[in-house]
């Protein structure tokens, strides 16, 4: 049986866009074991839903999963990789009220550029990857023994980037997201 684990994180903003996509996909995949940590978002129909999974239990599910779908937060991404899974990441988008700013979009793009996550931003792309997982044509397993140095390097590289100009003309210093001061 295919096991797919989903975590939307613990942010107080709802991520019903993702859980809605999964509910629609789930209707045609009743044979998949779908485990969802949905936080404040709507649960996924006919899935094993938990508002919050204790960290050790979530890590056990990551190790057992054929695929892990996450929001674009660094903690979950690095946890998935440390447990042997290249995560599928759907970043929260402030345009939909899912977060306060676009840092998950920026961070996810950074991860995708370095091959540290597979990032999707639309329902069709997500369901295509999940379908490929179920069909056995896509594998998300990676060697976790190499992950700590790669993850630390990826975050360090991101934090050391110079400020960039956003499309709206404002300047963005990504490292401020993680609490450093100018």
Image (spheres, grey):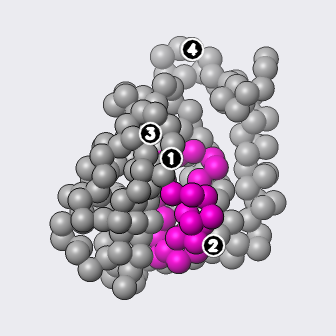
Q: Which residue is mark 4?
A: 170
Q: Is residue 31 above or below residue 24?
A: below
Secondary structure under badge 4?
loop
Instruction: Determine crowd level at label 3: few under 14, some 14-19, many 20+ residues with C-alpha closer than 10 A.
Output: many
Mark 1 vs 2, N-terminal side: 1
The percent coordinates of residue 102 (x first, y second) are 51, 30
Residue shown at 56% from the left, 33% from the top: 103
Q: Quadrant of residue 84?
A: bottom right
Q: What distance separates the C-alpha of mark 1 from that of mark 4?
A: 28 Å
Q: What distance separates the C-alpha of mark 2 from that of mark 4?
A: 38 Å
Q: Nearer the viewer, mark 1 or mark 2?
A: 1
Q: What distance separates the C-alpha of mark 3 from that of mark 1?
A: 10 Å
Left or right, residue 171 beside residue 72:
right
Mark 2 vs 4, N-terminal side: 2
The percent coordinates of residue 166 (x first, y second) are 54, 22
Left or right, residue 31 beside residue 38:
left
Q: Which residue is mark 3?
A: 92
Mark 4 vs 3, N-terminal side: 3
Residue shown at 42% from the left, 29% from the top: 94
Q: Are marks 1 and 4 in contact (CB under 8 Å)?
A: no
Mark 2 vs 3, N-terminal side: 2
Q: Which residue is mark 1?
A: 9
Q: Which residues are magenta?
A: 53-76
In the picture, the disc for residue 101 is none
Q: What distance separates the C-alpha of mark 2 from that of mark 3?
A: 23 Å
Rendered-image quadrant of the C terminus? top right
Q: Are marks 4 and 3 in contact (CB under 8 Å)?
A: no
Report the front residue among 18 and 153. 18
Q: Which residue is mark 2?
A: 84
The percent coordinates of residue 31 (x first, y second) are 26, 80
Q: Nearer the viewer, mark 2 or mark 4?
A: 2
Q: Are marks 3 and 1 in contact (CB under 8 Å)?
A: no
């Amino acid at each position: 049986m295919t096991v797919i684990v989903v975590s939307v994180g613990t942010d107080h903003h709802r991520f019903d866009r993702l859980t809605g996509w999964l509910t629609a996909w789930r209707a045609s995949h009743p044979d998949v074991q779908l485990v969802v940590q949905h936080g404040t978002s709507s649960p996924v129909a006919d899935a094993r839903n938990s508002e919050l999974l204790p960290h050790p239990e979530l890590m056990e599910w990551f190790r057992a999963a054929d695929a892990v779908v996450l929001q674009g937060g660094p903690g979950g991404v690095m946890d998935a990789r440390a447990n042997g899974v290249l995560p599928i990441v759907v970043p929260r988008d402030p345009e939909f009220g899912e977060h306060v700013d676009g840092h998950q979009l920026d961070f996810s793009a950074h991860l995708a550029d370095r091959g540290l996550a597979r990032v999707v931003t639309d329902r069709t792309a997500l369901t295509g990857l999940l379908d490929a997982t179920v069909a056995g044509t896509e594998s998300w397993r990676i060697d976790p023994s190499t992950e700590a140095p790669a993850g630390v390097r990826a975050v360090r590289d991101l934090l050391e980037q110079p400020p960039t100009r956003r499309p709206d003309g404002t300047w963005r210093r990504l490292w401020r997201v993680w609490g450093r001061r100018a």
